[in-house]
Amino acid sequence: MTELKILLRDSFRSSKKQACLLEISAAIGTANCAGAPRLKYMFGRPPPVIAAKDLTVPLPTDSVTSILARFADAGFSPQEAVALLSSHTIAAADKIDTRIPGTPFDTTVDVFDSQVFLEVLLKGTMFPGQGNISHTGEVLSPIAGEMRLQSDFAVSQDPRTACFWQDMINNQNSMTSQFKAAMAKLQVLGQKNLVDCSDVVPVPKPFAGPIKYPATFSQKDVQQACKQHPFPKLATVSGPAPTVAPVPGS
Ligand code: HEM
């Protein structure tokens, strides 16, 4: 913990504070979620000099061709792009529908599990928020209070990525090791002299698994786009259909 305090103090004093803090927050924040891999923390990333130009960061309304092209520009394969999207297992939206900040992308937003890969494949019937109104960047969601990103759904259905997506389901070790490897690549992108300070990153709690269909759902609700691989057999949580609570503090 002392090392962490020194690191944070030095980050604040340095002109590099913004970029360094973002990176260490990502590594430590992820480690707070059970099931997460222990990410690396590479110290010394300088602050950005300009904002990313328009159309260089993928939008949820982009086509899969455009999304994969942006990842390829940065040296990431379609499989690595899907691996990075594992991050959406612990993510929520504030900006898609600003009236419902903190709307999670799966039913287990505090656990780094493969639930998001399953739930994005479940047929949607509603939009979260008041009035069942659609907002740019989302598609119909299967679960009350949950947001299904248009881009996640598109990637889950595209022939170039559908099997990578499906293969993540209930495959915790593969998902976390692919995510860790892709993140390690992302963390040093465009940098040469970063210092490996990964020792300060806590060891995350394990995830017991297996994952399950949310209550009332089963394989009949799956929009399976990868027909070449068998769909994993999963149990269903008992009880009534869930309503997902927003992430507090968003
Ligand atoms: C196809 C590429 C991607 C698209 C289109 C995309 C889109 C989005 C959108 C629209 C949100 C919700 C933002 C809001 O309304 O506040 C979001 C949240 C998030 N995304 Fe992605 N994303 C992509 C890739 C990634 C990658 C590669 C990572 C990390 C490795 C990532 C990590 C996150 C996280 C952590 C959040 C939650 C932020 C928060 O809770 O404030 N995303 N993403």
Image: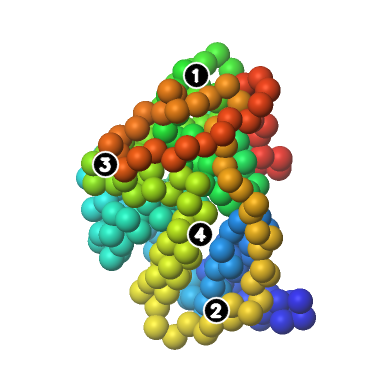
Give, as a three-letter code, the residue at label 1: Met
Rounded to the nearest angstrom, the CA distance separating label 3 from label 2 is 42 Å
Tag in front: 4 or 1: 4
Answer with mark 3 or mark 4, whichever residue precedes in sequence: 4
**Gap in angstroms between the C-alphas marked 3 and 4:** 21 Å
Q: What residue does disc 3 label? A: 228
Query: In the image, what residue type sits under mark 2?
Result: Phe
Residue 198's spot in the image, x, y percent?
59, 77
Residue on which the image places disc 1: 126
The answer to whether residue 98 of the structure is visible from this angle is no
Of mark 4 and mark 1, the one earlier in the sequence is 1
Distance of label 4 from label 2 (alpha carbons): 27 Å
Of tags 1 and 2, the one toward the viewer is 1
| Badge 1 vs badge 3, beta-carbon distance below 8 Å | no
**217 w.r.t. 79: above or below:** above
Which residue is found at the position 63% from the left and 30% from the top? 237
SS under mark 3: loop
| Mark earlier in primary sequence (3, 2) | 2
Query: Is 151 placed left or right of 118 in the picture?
Result: left
Q: Which mark is residue 43?
A: 2
Q: From mark 4 to mark 1, how far is it between C-alphas?
A: 32 Å
Vertical relation: 150 (above or below) 195: above
Q: Which kind of residue does numbered mark 3 sit on?
A: Gln
Q: Secondary structure at mark 1?
A: loop
Residue 93 x/y as whole percent: 54, 39
